[in-house]
Amino acid sequence: MEHPGFFQKAGPFSAAELAKELGAELVGTGDTEISDIKPLDGAGPSDLTFLDNRKYLNEFASTKAGACLVAPRFADKAPEGLVCLTIKDPYGAYAKALSIFYPDSVIPRTTHPAAEGAIHPSATIEDDVVVEPGAVVGPEARIGKGTRIAAGAVIGYRVHVGRDCYIGPNANLIHTLVGNRVVIHSGVCTGQDGFGFAMGAEGHKKVPQIGRVILQDEVEIGANTTIDRGALRDTVIGEGTKIDNLVQIGHNVAIGRHCIIVSQTGISGSAVLGDFVALGGKVGVEGHVRVGDGAQIAATSAVRGDVPAGAKWGGVPAKPVRLWFREVTLLRRLAEGKLKIQGDNEDGDAS
């Protein structure tokens, strides 16, 4: 059964109506009907999309969207038939457009304030489910056979949890779909807002986050880890991936199958990890980068660019380990006085 979604959608609106509301200049057919907002590569003829980063110009040139919020300097690269809503700040306009289409999306959907008892009457609970004292199961939630919901856990509005899962004490799941045989330890939070703000001189405008968190089968998540829901796309954790305690995963992140992510790692929004990737402790992954299948990143490294499949990288910024080790060795020898820079004088000062 297809999930009904977490937020109610308004509309549809014409492209002309949206241009007027957003303060954009309309280039194209104003009566084009727009019924939703989607990313560039997932939008269809009745969708609005946006471009605010030249990194995605190829996706912009091939998008199937009906209309796009775009800076004037990129409008001439639009594909034939695309209605452009040109504006100086496409990201800020996108934030406002989300509020128009999803007016209730700024406040997370958790549990119903009028619910009586721990389990809302509209929730679906299969056989052999244990809901411990103090746990709450919200409206229209679904809990699969053999799952245990520990004390103090919150299963929010329309959250689906599969079969034979364990949801630990004080874990909070909102805007989340969970597969089978998933283990979520105490204090985990999933589905909270992604950290999205359109910055401006008059303050920072909150960007509504209308995506979800998808936890596939046999994922395990360590205590006090946080996983933000997607902005437009879903945040996805692939089958069999194991995540340690105290990990932060940002919105729109896609993590492949059977990855290992060690404690205190932070993965920024829209980063993509392939299958069987291993990240050591305290690794930082910058937003929008790709880490290829089977790549390994050494502890305390900072990944600022794409990593090839099967590579072993480390350092700040991260680079191939052979190069990193040579850097470290040369710096140590220089610090110990065993290596002189050409032009040094007898006092060790550069001449």
Image: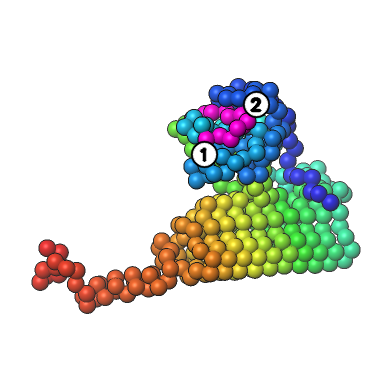
Specify the amino acid type for callout 2: Ala
Specify the amino acid type for callout 1: Asp
Q: Where is residue 21? Give x, y as percent.
A: 61, 24
Residue 268 appears in the figure? no
The residues tagged by marks 2 and 1 sit, at their Cα atoms, a distance apart of: 19 Å
Residue 52: image tag: 1
* Image height of 54 relative to 147, above or below: above
- The kind of secondary structure element at disc 1 is loop
Q: Is residue 294 magenta?
A: no
Give the residue at x 49% y 62%: 307
Residue nearest the viewer, comparing 3 with 115: 3
Q: Where is residue 220? Give x, y as percent.
A: 67, 67
Q: Where is residue 110? Give x, y as percent.
A: 73, 47
Q: Which residues are magenta?
A: 77-88
Residue 302 appears in the figure? yes
The residue pinned by badge 2 equals 15
- The kind of secondary structure element at disc 2 is helix
Residue nearest the viewer, comparing 61 with 139: 61
Q: Earlier in the sequence, mark 2 or mark 1?
A: 2
